[in-house]
Image (cartoon, helix red, strand yellow):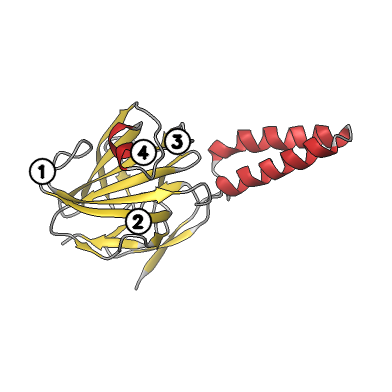
Amino acid sequence: MNQKRINSTLPIAREGLPFIIIGAAIAIVAGIFHLVSLFVVMSIITLFIVYFFRDPNRISPVDENAVLTPADGKILSIEKLEKGDHNYKHSSIKISIFMSLFNAHINRIPIKGVILDICYTPGKFFSANMDKASQYNEHNIITLETYNDKKIAFVQIAGLIARRIACWVKERDNVESGQRFGLIRFGSRLEVYLPTNSEITVQKGQKVKAGQTVIGYIT
């Protein structure tokens, strides 16, 4: 399969830099004053923050009909919705992906197209692997139109610990498959809504990688 590389200039998401700098600064001060316990704890915390905000380069398929997972994690569910739901009001196939604390949290565009709409809604912070998180948690819905006039939506959903959704695209942006478009801090959930005649290529429980794993094809 032909592939393309969507590169980043930094191996760490910029949103993580303030946390890394603060953690490293506290560890250095603790080391200077021989506060061994604090030095060890802050060093471990800083290393985890670096790991959490890692931004690996990925090689993405170039098939224009391929839909990529927007998030690293595990497929929670695959549902066919005849009348849509609270996040997307059209009939569709809904794929839910759970990101744990140990997944890379950079979110990526599922398929090439144009951003039609972005709708942020504040809400609660239930654990992201619970079904009610989809309905009640803080979330951000992005609707996209593909090159062949198909519409899909993908939703960033905050979790129990995640308290901030970052979105780096805006309406009318032209975007590429695998392009970085945001992140959610500290454990969360992504949902993708595809046309009902899409071919789904993943299964419940499968582990996936953002911008790399094909979850389906739009026909």
Q: Nearer the viewer, residue 197 or 131?
A: 131
Q: Secondary structure at mark 3?
A: loop
Q: Which mark is first along the chain, 1 or 3?
A: 1
Q: Which mark is residue 83?
A: 1
* Residue drawn 15% across the image and 38% down it: 89
Q: Quadrant of residue 74?
A: bottom left
Where is residue 203 shown, x and y percent of the image? 30, 63
Q: Quadrant of residue 36?
A: top right
Q: Where does the C terminus fall, quadrant-wise?
A: bottom left
The reply to whether dot 4 and dot 3 touch (C-beta < 8 Å) is: no
Q: Nearer the viewer, residue 182 or 116?
A: 182
Q: Amino acid at mark 4?
A: Ile
Q: CA distance from mark 3 to mark 1?
A: 28 Å
Q: CA distance from mark 4 to mark 3?
A: 10 Å
Q: Residues within 10 Å of mark 1 (few under 14, many from 20)?
A: few
Q: Secondary structure at mark 1?
A: loop
* Residue drawn 67% across the image and 41% down it: 45
Check disc 4 and report the residue beneath it. Answer: 157
Q: Amino acid at mark 3?
A: Leu
Check disc 2 and report the residue beneath it. Answer: 75
